[in-house]
Amino acid sequence: MLFYSIALLGSPLEPLTYHSVDCLSAGREVDVTLSNRLQQGVVIEECEKPEFTTQPIGMTRSFFYTDAQIQCAQFMSEYYGCSLGEALNLYVPYSIEIEPIRKEISLSSINVILSESQVKALDFIRSHPVSLLFGDTGAGKSEIYMRRMDEILSEGKRALLLLPEISLTPQMESRFREHFGDAVVLWHSKMTPKQKKVTLEKIYNGEAHIIVGPRSALFLPIADLGLIVVDEEHDESYKSSSRPRYNARDMAVYLGSLLKIPVVLGSATPSLGSYAKYPFFRLRGGFYESKRTFVFEPSLEALTPSIDRIIMGNFTDGHQGIVFIPTRANFKYTVCESCGYHVECPFCSVGMSQHKNSRALKCHYCNYTEVLPKICPKCQSGALRTARLGTAEAVEHFSRLSETLRVQQFDRDIITTQNKLIKVLEAFNRHEIDLLVGTQMLSKGHDYHDIALAVVMGLDNLLSQSDYRAREKALSLLVQIAGRSGRKQNATVFVQSFNEHFFREYLEDYEKFLIDELRIRNGRYPPTKKLARLLYAHKNGVKAKAAMEEAVVQLQRIDTVQIVGFGASAIERIADKYRFQILLRSDKSTDLIRAIKHVKSSMMEIDMDPIEFT
């Protein structure tokens, strides 16, 4: 009889011991039972016979996890504070039944021609195991990626291109297919089961040489992987907001070190952590000789006559424009003018957003929806008003400016599928849409051809957030949105903000901002310090608070970590659970991990390197 340590896929439990008469290799996927329920597990290692009675291992499946996948999962389990089974559940295993084939690919006759500075950038990323391509918008980072991939493919290896969101993939896929043809495959969560099956078969059998997708693509079974590119590496979408709370950019770097393959990070506004940690090449300028003029209006977030005039002037001149608004839907809050009652979600301590088309109020945290009220639920007054402008309301407003102005909403309420995204972008590039009004989707690297105006609202709300990265997030967002305009002609960027001095100081020199910000954060916040957030959530608020307070007492005795703050979360209740948190700071992540293990409880959620604090 042989005994094995088995990690249960998706389970928060630590690996359990089972027995088998067969000799099983580490990484093999098997069926086991737990409390009379069939579960899938992964063989981690052979172990000694325990003192207790063990259950037998059932069927051995035709899938396996490689040593690199298991090592990455073990690192994720240790660093991000999840179980090994939860970490392994992110990965797609390799198939024993499908033999990879060597298939030659024929590249397009369209040659990728690099400028002198791009050639220098290519030489730079060749010479470093991890490198940061710090390139202005329109400077040609994609062409450098493709040339490096050409070299990797010529060595008989494959490449992975990570993008922060699904919304970025259609145009990038199209660009890469022009050069690499059918060697490119796309992977993302919106694919149908059939599409995923076809794509996986191509990955298994070796037909797929270039794999493009968001963070989940990092966990695909790509044999002979020779290069990982993380585009828009600064984007928060690489950080998972649910357990395990990993950062795909950092896991890509870790996987690259395990496999001894190069990793390239790219961004026009790199994160301060990457800028400080990795060697970088500064790629300045762009392919187009147009220029952008920045115009600031000191105003609160509102649709002003100045915005109307500049939009209509741009439209009259025959150009397209984009408008950024941080809030989707019609309005963010509904308030009673008689008694001040704030219409909140019954399960979350946040205001409900108004969606006129569906005549409903919706919570953007738990998705609870209720009928749009006509009178105040508290005082029965009909004096309900709305606050915080949303994209839908802005679309209605701009549509009234001119009967011929074609306005399109561009956010998650409208762009719900990949096909809708593709159709809107294609219609915009065919000049069937004059004005796109959207949220941060507008900043996500889409290639807009003829934008001569970008209107940016709500930046001061970002700057005022209680987040040590508020300045970085606001400036990066402005640079990214401005970069969507002026690709082939001069453009105006109209910014509503009372902080013109701050933005103007760094708009033309983002590296100066990074240098200054590094000095400001030194000794207080990342990248010179490590942070961890411990989140306690329970339907009984008293229990959650007591668990937090007990942990605070224990953590105060550990001199290698500092408690930055603790108490109720900024959004105290989500999905009918009360939330409390502790923010920890230390010089070393190892000290944080040791301290967290000391206070670990079933009620506690661990968020290493947090990027949200609500």
Image (cartoon, rainbow, N blue to C red):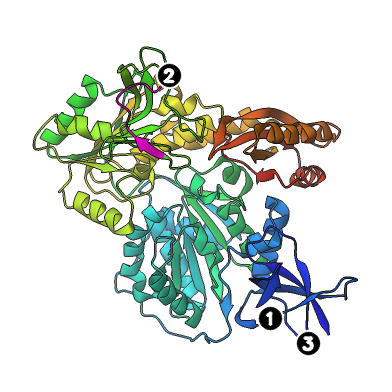
How far from the left and from the top, in percent, is residue 231?
Answer: 46, 54
How far from the left and from the top, in percent, is residue 70?
Answer: 68, 68
Mark 1 element type: loop
In this rendering, position of residue 458 left or right of residue 513: left
Q: How many marks?
A: 3
Front-most of residues 84 and 303 = 84
Give the quadrant of residue 568.
Answer: top right
In this rendering, position of residue 158 left or right of residue 424: right
In this figure, which residue is indicated by the disc labeled 2? 341
Q: Looking at numbered disc 1 in the image, what kind of residue is underneath it?
A: Gly
Farthest right residue?
Answer: 51
Q: State the separation of the CA atoms marked 3 and 2.
A: 67 Å
Regarding residue 421, the answer to whether it shows in the image is: yes
User: Was residue 371 drawn as part of the magenta stretch in this picture?
Assistant: yes
In this figure, which residue is indicated by the disc labeled 1? 58
How far from the left and from the top, in percent, is residue 283?
Answer: 45, 48
- Residue stretch rendered in magenta on the structure: 369-377
In this rendering, position of residue 332 left or right of residue 217: left
Q: Residues within 10 Å of mark 1 (few under 14, many from 20)?
A: some
Q: Looking at numbered disc 2 in the image, what kind of residue is underneath it?
A: Tyr
Front-most of residues 342 and 592 = 342
Q: Is residue 321 above or below residue 130?
A: above
Q: Is residue 138 above or below residue 223?
A: above
Farthest top residue?
Answer: 338
Q: Tags 3 and 2 in contact by the CB under 8 Å rule?
A: no
Farthest left residue?
Answer: 403
Q: Which badge, 2 or 1, comes first in the chain's sequence?
A: 1
In this figure, which residue is indicated by the disc labeled 3? 21
